[in-house]
Amino acid sequence: MFKVFCILLSLLVLSRGQKQRCDQTPPQATVITPSDNMGIYRMSISTKGNDTNIYRPDQTYVLKLTTNNATRPFRWFMITVEDPEMDNNSEYDPKLVDVGSLKTIDTNKQSRYSERCYNSVENTDNSDKYKVEIHWVSPKQNARRQKVRLRAMVAENKEVWHVGENLTITLEKDDRRPLDSPPYPPEPNCNLCSEAQYEVIFNGRWSRMTHPRYYPSKPDDNGYSHLVGASHSFSHTIWQPADQASPGLQKLAEEADISLIEREIIDSMSPLNGTRTLIIGKRRFHPNMGEPSHSLFRVDNVHHLFSLVVAIKPSPDWFLGAYKFELCTNVGWLKESEIPLFPWDAGTMDGVSYEIQFSHALTCKMIYRKNREKTQKKKKMKKRSQ
């Protein structure tokens, strides 16, 4: 059974900073020593399940700054993401280590990128705040077992501000095999002499009950695109993480239109390489989104992998998919497998929820249609946090 998980998206960080540890003392403070938090203020992160101390590479997480006392709001805040190793190195340069990036959620206009510190966001105004949400995109995949520290400051007024306990989170990279990984890694050669026929079934589980956060206000507009993909050779790529989306994938993710990616697959058909069988499954709309979409396809010792995608609507450019799924094993063709699908964004549009997109992204999209080569935004697809 394939599963859909809720996601969020917003702008990339563009903050500047100095070559040193960020001093989070509020500029307005008349007292240089922070006060005892006493458990009133807290920063939390939306890691999956009980894995509160780890992160998965290249995913978006939600950070929340909150007060548990209705009479004790905070006016100013700052959140910084950094490498804990900087504490042991006076010459540490924060720009040399990938600790991910912070994103503001501009719908509330409560935060902005800090000009005082690198990889930091801070308050926009002096209003009383009871909850602030920020997004953190974790570091890209690398060989280091890297730790990341998220450090926050909240200030009630010029004399009372807090750091430290309950406002600092240290995370370590999760090196476990992702849940949505196929059972076998893709291999360049398949030694089987026979062919095989498979049926792929997509079951969506997106609803207000399963994913209430930012659920669209007009559920009648909800739906999945057609299931589309192909069986293909090892050297052929329909899509994969960190690649720039093809024009066909962009059109699918943004408009739920499979016509261009379908043409890309058909044009790549070859008995010696490329694709073999086009995968097409039925499109599902609300309130029938829970009904399965399925398709049959064939594989051989050249075309022994398959990839597929399904767009989520409404959304800026989010989709579900499997890529380079290996079906050829040392003991024969894979008999069956079931994996969850987690959302990805194609990296072609900006948005903070299913329905909200930034106006500049819409403008870029219109210009792009007039002159693709000059205006296409060079972003890469990323997985969204669960």
Image (tube, rainbow, N blue to C red):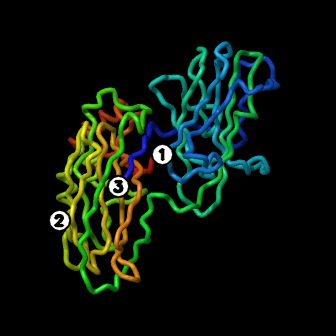
Q: Give the residue drawn at x 29%, y 44%.
A: 290
Q: Quadrant of the N terminus?
A: bottom left
- Marks 3 and 2, how far apart in space? 21 Å
- CB contact under 8 Å: marks 3 and 2: no
Whole-percent x, y for residue 346 in the image: 36, 48
User: Earlier along the polypeptide chain: callout 1 or callout 3?
Assistant: 3
> Vertical placement of 175 versus 235: above or below?
above
> Vertical placement of 126 versus 377: above or below?
above
Is 61 displayed left or right of 256 in the figure?
Answer: right
Q: Secondary structure at mark 2?
A: helix
**Residue type indicated by callout 3:** Gly
User: Earlier along the polypeptide chain: callout 2 or callout 1?
Assistant: 2
* Residue on which the image places disc 2: 267
Q: Give the residue drawn at x 54%, y 30%.
A: 133
Nearest to viewer (mark 2 / mark 1): 1
Q: Give the residue drawn at x 26%, y 51%.
A: 292
- Marks 2 and 1, how far apart in space? 35 Å
**Residue type indicated by callout 2:** Asp
Is 61 displayed left or right of 227 in the figure?
Answer: right
Q: Give the residue drawn at x 39%, y 53%.
A: 341
Q: Secondary structure at mark 3?
A: strand
* Residue on which the image places disc 1: 386
What is the crowding at mark 2: few (fewer than 14 residues within 10 Å), some, or many (at least 20)? few
User: Earlier along the polypeptide chain: callout 3 or callout 2?
Assistant: 2
What is the crowding at mark 3: few (fewer than 14 residues within 10 Å), some, or many (at least 20)? many
* Residue on which the image places disc 3: 321
Is 108 displayed left or right of 254 in the figure?
Answer: right
